[in-house]
Image: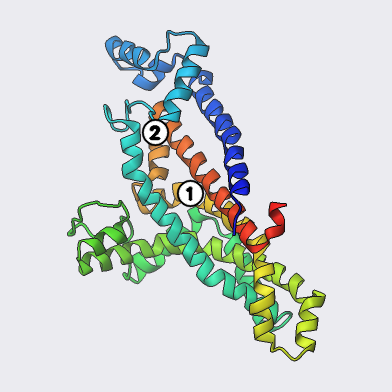
Amino acid sequence: MVSKRFVLKRLLMLFPVLFGVATVVFAILHLSPGDPAVVIAGERASQEFVNQIRSDLGLDDPLWQQYIRFLGEVATFDFGQSYQVNRGTAVSQILVDRLPITIELALLGQFAGLLFGLPLGILSAVKQDTWTDHLTRIGALSGISIPIYWSGPLLILLFAQFLGLLPTSGRIGSEYFVEPVTGLILVDTLLAGNLAAFQSAVIHLLLPVVVLGIYQMALLSRMMRSSMVEVIRQDYMRTARAKGQGSKITVMKHGLRNAFIPVITVIGIQFGSLLGGAVLTETVFEINGIGTLLVDAINRSDYPVVQGTVLVFAVLYTLVNLGVDLTYSVLDPRIEQ
């Protein structure tokens, strides 16, 4: 059981991190070369539009006033409006529409990595220095070495162009329309009771999830193997086997929980990298998530959207690490001390 004091302590530690990120995000607008209002509006924009942006963002106010106002708006998740990506639309609304798409991809990629990476790591550790171990390690090293921007197009060429088995882009077939409820296409199709649309969504998401899951699987299997090998050599594991307990029961009952503690850190860190990897994955597979939103906003110098997107990434990353800390305390209560 996690103590309330431990949870409160971890929550309080989040605020300095988020405050620092918000400060850096605020500086993005003011450290960029040129007049921010002109940069956002574009060189061919009318002077009236430039003045409107300057007024909306309060760029004529003293810098300290702009900073205080920005922190207040961030605290209420008010990031202003978009001037280029989706002109006139609140940034918070754009993020609400796009964020579930990226979260769905990240969760599915993480699930795929856990589903295959952990068992392979355990198997490799138990069968250390056998052909199973060597093949698993070679596969893991290959998976870590392959970048997303290379594996994505390669899988598209193989399964979409040559074999014609899977689609090249999108989240669902163009012939289907599903009313968004949660923003998660798999959940929404099930809620709508449209099994054909659900199958289409599964087929469309398969390649992006595989691309994200390959790296996760490879890294988690290596970490799990390393941690499990170290645990297997501990005295309490030898004692359990010496008392006549079967090797499988010993590994699963005594070894797995202790070996899983350092792996939890990697899972938390890698979930954050999955959100970053979504930028490349969504670009390759033309999925309109928060990753492509960030790229589009940067290309168009839509600073309010850039600021809001970066802050959302930061909040998600800190929340994931909070979850990691809480999981730590469940697996090893000594961490709370």
Image location of residue 273, percent across then percent down:
54, 50
Give the residue type at disc 2: Ala
Q: Is residue 7 found left or right of 335 in the rendered image?
A: left
Mark 1–mark 2 distance (CA, rounded to whole Å): 17 Å
- Answer yes or no: is residue 182 visible: yes
Q: Quadrant of the N terminus?
A: bottom right
24 left or right of 98? right
Task: Choose the circle earlier in sequence order: 1 or 2.
Answer: 1
Residue at the image position 50 percent from the left and 40 percent from the top: 315
* Residue drawn 68% across the image and 71% down it: 225
- Residue under label 2: 297
Give the color scheme: rainbow, by chain, secondary structure or one colour. Answer: rainbow
User: Which of the two discs, 1 and 2, sits closer to the camera?
Assistant: 1
Q: Is 261 above or below relative to 90?
A: below
Q: Nearer the viewer, residue 282 or 308?
A: 308
The picture quadrant where one finds residue 197 is bottom left
Amino acid type indicated by mark 1: Leu
Q: Residue 206: percent from the left, percent from the top?
A: 38, 65
Reply above or below: 17 against 125: above
Q: Classify 10 Å Cα crowding around label 1: few (below 14), some (14-19), many (20 and above).
A: many
> Looking at this view, is 281 or 289 the one in front?
289
Locate residue 321, reporting x and y percent: 58, 49
- Name the residue: 41% across, 52% down: 103
Q: Position of residue 30 (x, y in %)?
A: 50, 18
To which quarter of the image does residue 194 belong? Answer: bottom left
Mark 2 residue element: helix
Disc 1 designates what residue? 275
Q: Marks 1 and 2: CB-CB under 8 Å? A: no
